[in-house]
Amino acid sequence: MASNTDQRIRVLPRVWIGVTVYVAYVVVVFGVQKLTGVPYTELGKSGTNLFLGAGLSLIVSAILLAITTTLLGWWRPALFDRHRATHKWPIVAPAIMVVALLANLAATDWGSYDGAFFAASLVLLLVGFTEELTTRGLLLVGLRSRLAEVWVWLLTSALFGLMHLINAASGQPIGPTLQQVAFAFGAGTIFYVLRRVTGSLVWAMVLHGFWDFSTFAVTHGKPGPLAALSGVLEIAAIVFAFIAVAFVIRNADEQISEAGAARR
């Protein structure tokens, strides 16, 4: 436990706590999705399917994550770095992703949406809060208690990618799932870069939420020609992020020791 003088961090960060939160999140999401009985491949068929198959698990996990973060007293280290990255130019990677996001929205067949489906799809924005708080929030805080920042980036991004394997267990073919895992690792690196450059997880939450919303939206109905451009831009953003990540890690002073916890 943190000292009595520290009213922000109640439980001293440990690697096992961050990993436990990550595993628990995956179990809760998968469990709720299996209980609803809606296969991953049928999410886009109706607003009811989308809400029960994806939205409900996000609502449940968001509530549980908020409670867990409050009990641990980890809100501040989960949401904010002590220092921003020295280099600012890596912001180009998430900026390219924003352009790709806008291309998705421009290519979306909005006429294929009905009111119920649109309302259910808005719940998908919660994924930015839940997945970011789990991986680049609580897991990151736990890892920073013992590991160098390069490992914090690598493990949070890799485990973020592997999280998507549950889609195969929910009915998605293994080939597209493995591709999703790889792209999620790249996207995770972009979100990590955004956290380090801005010093806050909040912007990564926002970008992540709208990115998932846009990638789902563009697959509903008949996408426009800009959909192909979005894919190219996403790859460009990932490549740029892999180059930039070394620069946002350089000279990072974010490791959370007992003394570091007290400074927060």
Image: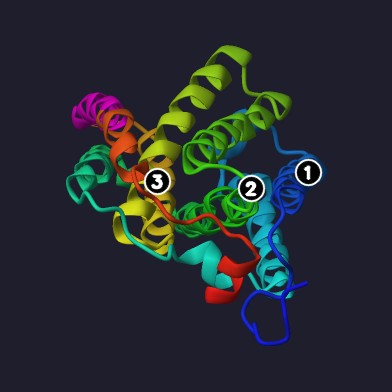
On the image, the x and y values in percent for residue 17 come to: 75, 53
Region of the chain picked out in magenta, as a range = 225-239
Question: Which residue is at 41% across, 30% downward?
Answer: 186
On the image, the x and y values in percent for residue 15 come to: 70, 48
Q: Nearer the viewer, residue 39 or 236?
A: 236
Disc 3 target residue: 191
Q: Pick out the residue farthest to the top.
A: 175
Q: How crowded is mark 1: few (under 14 residues within 10 Å), some or many (20 or more)?
A: some
Q: Residues within 10 Å of mark 3 (few under 14, many from 20)?
A: many
Amino acid, disc 2 = Arg
Specify the principal SS of the magenta part: helix
Cα gap from disc 2 to disc 1, whole angstroms: 25 Å
Q: Can residue 174 be seen in this view?
A: yes
Query: Secondary structure beneath disc 2?
Result: loop
Question: Which residue is at 69% across, 46% downward?
Answer: 22
Position above or below: 70 against 164: below
